[in-house]
Amino acid sequence: MALDSEISLAALNDLGAQFRGLNLNEPETWPAAPRILFAVLAAVLVLLLGWQFYWSGKLDELDRKHAEQESLKQAYQSKVAQVANLDALRKQKAEVEQRVALVERQLPNKTEMDALLADVNHAGVARGLQFELFKPQPAVLKPYFAEIPVNLKVTGRYHDVAQFNADVAALSRIVSMQGMQFTTGKDGGLTMEAVAMAYRALDPEEQAAQRKAEAAAAKTAAGAKK
């Protein structure tokens, strides 16, 4: 054991002697141990600098590319699903267009509104109702149509008032009764107060004004976001 300790101590002394008196300007004259240690340290330094200034950025870019790939894959799968349902979507679109066209045909234009209001009035008269109020209000413009509220108050028998509402609902044009209130008179008659909401299509000038207003609103909203 003493011999082994002496050999190890001698080896350490010899190794330490190789690091003494080194000339930093002439590394090619260094013994083997310093040259190996310096080479290892230089390699570690190069790896650290490479990681800090090159490889770490490349790994971040690789992660971004992977995320972009996943996003593109999901978008592709979504497009494939849409293409697979394209025929069904076209069929639904055609059905919606048919329903819209049907509703549009039920909307009178501005010149036909007088006839529609007259039909509402005639429906009440035909049922023997007495009109105490029939007052159309100014049109309220909506994005695709206009609403014309008509304040009305009619008096008659319960059955006739009910039939009047049914007749209005059965008109070829769209008219809805809103805010209905009923009171019973001393003679047993029934009084109904309501708003008959009629609808009409927008004329070209109104449509142009609506598009202009929508464009202005969109521009204002876009400016507010900035």
Image (cartoon, grey):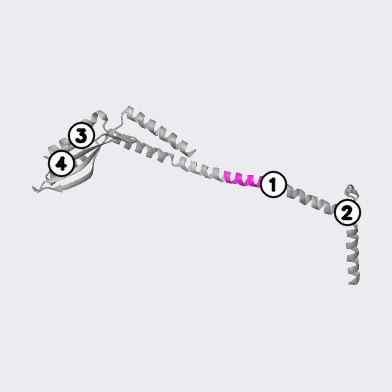
Please tell me the numbered disc located at residue 32: 2
Q: For marks 2 and 1, give the CA distance.
A: 32 Å
Q: Residues within 10 Å of mark 1 (few under 14, many from 20)?
A: some
Q: 89 left or right of 125?
A: right
Judge by depth and name the residue closer to the eye, 119 or 141.
Answer: 141
Which quarter of the image is occupied by the N terminus? bottom right
- CA distance separating discs 3 and 1: 79 Å
* Residue 117, numbered circle: 3
Q: In which quarter of the image is residue 122?
A: top left
Q: Which of 195 and 124 is in front in this view?
A: 195
Horizontal and vertical percent position of residue 57: 66, 45
Q: Is mark 2 on a helix, strand or loop?
A: helix
First in sequence: mark 4 vs mark 3: 3
Residue hosting label 1: 55
The part of the image, by quadrant, that contains residue 91 is: top left
The residue positioned 67% from the left and 47% from the top of the image is 56
Callout 2 crowding tier (Cα within 10 Å): few <14, some 14–19, many ≥20: few
Q: How far apart are marks 3 and 2 (CA)?
A: 111 Å
**Dominant secondary structure of the magenta stretch?**
helix
What amino acid is labelled 3 in the image?
A: Leu
x then y, percent, for residue 215: 41, 32
Mark 1 to mark 4 CA distance (whole Å): 86 Å
Q: Do the residues labelled 2 and 1 touch (CB within 8 Å)?
A: no
Q: Residue furthest left?
A: 187
Residue type at mark 1?
Trp
Label 3 vs 1, first from the N-terminus: 1
Residue range corresponding to the magenta coloring: 51-68
The label number, if any, that marks residue 154 in the structure image: 4
**Is residue 121 at all visible to an observer of this figure?**
yes
Residues tagged 3 and 2 counted as in contact (Cβ below 8 A): no
Marks 3 and 1: which is nearer the front? Answer: 3
